[in-house]
Amino acid sequence: MKGEPIIKDAGYLSLVRRLPCIVPGCDPDLAGGEVHHPYPEGTGIKCSDFDGVPICHCHHTQGANAVDGFNQMSDDEWWANVACMTREEAIWKTRQDVISIVERGRLVSEEKLCRMKKRLGLA
């Protein structure tokens, strides 16, 4: 989230891509595959991979940041009316869902899981 250090982590992003689209009611068959970084609000400005949220291609291309001119909503309106949550809530939900995947699948050691939780602010 804003103010946190910029961290790049390909393993974390691969776990985010396994999650369903952040938009409630999205068809699970369309889910996943893309990661949206809701921060920062500037083209070419880097943000942490831990701020990425899972989103299907349809919602990603129709989101408030889409460049096709189709969407007339502001970014905040898109998050409130389409995703039905704030950016911050989406980021925290994603972080918790990633930890849940890791815990269920025992994908990493307990030590690495503890470090991951700490880095995500969940410990």
Image: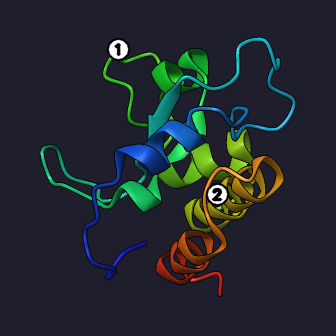
Looking at the image, is mark 2 or mark 1 earlier in the sequence?
1
Q: Is residue 63 visible?
A: no
Please give left or right for residue 113 compared with residue 63 in the image. right
The extreme right residue here reads: 25
Along the line of sight, the residue nearer the viewer: 105 or 41: 105
Q: How is the image coloured?
A: rainbow
Along the line of sight, the residue nearer the viewer: 120 or 38: 120
**What amino acid is at disc 1?**
Asp
Q: Position of residue 115 (x, y in %)?
A: 51, 79
The extreme bottom residue here reads: 123
Mark 2 vs mark 1, CA separation in Å: 24 Å
Along the line of sight, the residue nearer the viewer: 13 or 75: 13
Task: Judge whether 111 appears above or below 38 on screen.
Answer: below
Q: Position of residue 71 (x, y in %)?
A: 48, 25
Q: Pick the quarter of the image with the N terminus.
A: bottom left
Regarding mark 1 in the picture, which secondary structure is present there? loop
> Mark 2 highlights which residue?
90
> Mark 1 highlights which residue?
68
